[in-house]
Image: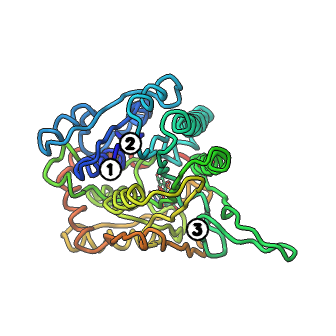
Amino acid sequence: MKILILGGDGYLGWPTAMQLSALGHETAVVDNYLRREICRRVDVSPLMPTPTLHERVTLWKKISGHGIRVWIGDLTQWDFTMEVFQSFKPDAVIHYAEQPSAPYSMMDRRAASLTLHNNLMATLNIVFAVRDFCPDAHIVKLGTMGEYGTPNIDIEEGWIDIEHKGRTQKFLYPRQAGSLYHTTKIMDTDLLWFYVRVYGLAVTDLMQGPVYGLFTEENREHQALWPSFNYDELFGTVLNRFLVQAAIGYPLTVYGKGGQTRGYLNIMDTLNCVRLCVENPAPHGSLRIFNQFTETFSVNQLAERVCASGSRLGINVTIQTIPNPRVELEDHYYNPMHTGLLSLGLEPHYLTEERLDKMLSTVLTYREHIRKETIFRGVTWK
Ligand code: USQ
C-alpha cells in the first residue's frame, strides 16, 4: 500500500514509518518540525540526540534497504498539502500531525492559539486533500482517551446508544476534555464525523492513552533511529518522565493525590494498533472509533512500579507529591472499554518488570544528558 504518515518526525510518527516500510509498504513522511521548534522556544530537549528526518531516512535505507519519501512542510498550508497528496496519492493516511502537549496548550494565549490553529487546520486540509486527490484513501487519525475525560460511568468505544422518551439513537459518546489540547482532539473528531456524513470518507479515530517506551522491532540496535524521547514537563508523558526522574534521584513528581487513572500502552502497541487499522480499513461513509490502550494505572501505581524497578537495579527512588498544576479529578471512577483492537488481532506488550527495568537501565546510561531544570517548572492550568 501507499501510506502517508503526517507528523512523521514525532515520537510515534517515525517508528510507525519504519515499521510500515519494513513490511514493504511504500511509505512517505511529512513534518514541519513544529515540535522541535516549540522545544527550542521553551528550552527543553529530548533525552537522546534526534537526527533530522532526512538523516534518519538515509540511515534506515542503509540498514534496511527500504526507502521513505520525505516532505518537510506545514499541513496548515493548503498549497503544500495539495502538493503532497496530489503527488503521492496515498491508499492510507496516518494523521499524527498535531501539537500533542496538554501542558503546552495551557501555557498562554499564544500557545493555545497555535494548538487550536495547527490541529484543526491540519485536519481540515487533510479532509479536503483526501476528498479531492485520493477519495478512496482511509484516514487513520490519532485522537486521545482524554476526549472522554473521566466520567462516572463506563466509557464505550466512541459511540453510545441513547434512549430518550421511548426513542433510541446512537451518538458519539459524550466528551469533556481536561485541556485545550484534548479539546482540539474533540473538535477533530467532530470535523471528521461531519465530513464522513457529507463526503462519505473512511475514517478510523483512535482514542489513545499515554504512550511509554523507546524500543520497537526496527530500532533496537541503532540509537539514531530511536524516537524523540521527551521527559520535560511539557512534552514528556508521565511514565517516561518518572524513568528519567528515577535515573537522577529526582523525587517522582506525583501530581495531587495521584489517583488519576488513565489507559496506557507501550509504543510497540501503538505501532501495531495503527498497522492493524491500516490493514483492516473502515468502510467508506463511516467513522470507526477504537479505544487504544492496553492496561489502566493510576499515577500512584506507576510511581510505585518505578520505585520497585529502581530497587531491582540498585538505585533509591523516592516519590514527592506536589500540588496538582492541572485541573483534573484525582480520585475517580474509570472503566473504559477496549475490545475493538484486540478483536482485530492486537497482542499487547504489557508493562512487565522486565520491560520496565530495561527502559530504566537504558535511561540510566543517558543520565549525563538529563537537564534537571526542565523536569518541573510549574506550568499551571489556571
Ligand atoms: N502526571 C503526574 N506527574 C507528572 C506528569 C503527569 O502526576 O509529572 C499526571 C497528569 O496529571 C495526568 C497523568 O499523569 O493525570 C497523565 O499525564 P501525561 O502528561 O502522561 O498525559 P497527558 O497530558 O494526558 O497527555 C499524554 C500525551 C497526549 C495524549 C494523552 C493521552 O501527551 O498527546 O493524547 O497522553 S490521555 O492522557 O489518555 O488523554
Residue at disc 2, secondary structure: strand
Amino acid at circle 1 = Thr
Residue at disc 3, secondary structure: loop
- Mark 1 = which residue? 16
- Mark 2 = which residue? 5
The residue shown at (53%, 52%) is 203
Is mark 3 in CB contact (under 8 Å) with mark 2? no
Number of residues whose C-alpha sits closer than 10 Å to that of mark 2, classed few (under 14), some (14–19) or many (20 or more)? many
Q: Any mark on residue 194, and which?
A: none
Q: Quadrant of residue 319?
A: bottom left
Q: Residue furthest right?
A: 165
Looking at the image, residue 243 sits to the left or right of residue 79; the answer is left
Amino acid at circle 3 = Glu
Q: CA distance from mark 3 to mark 2?
A: 35 Å
Residue at disc 1, secondary structure: helix
Q: Position of residue 341 (x, y in %)?
A: 44, 68
Asked whether 100 or 161 is in front, the reply is 161
Q: Residue furthest top?
A: 79
Mark 2 CB in 8 Å range of ligand 1?
no
The residue shown at (34%, 71%) is 348
| N-term mark: 3 or 2 | 2
The residue shown at (48%, 31%) is 75
Residue 275 visible at all: yes
Q: Position of residue 219 (x, y in %)?
A: 20, 51
| N-term mark: 1 or 3 | 1
Is mark 2 in CB contact (under 8 Å) with mark 1? yes
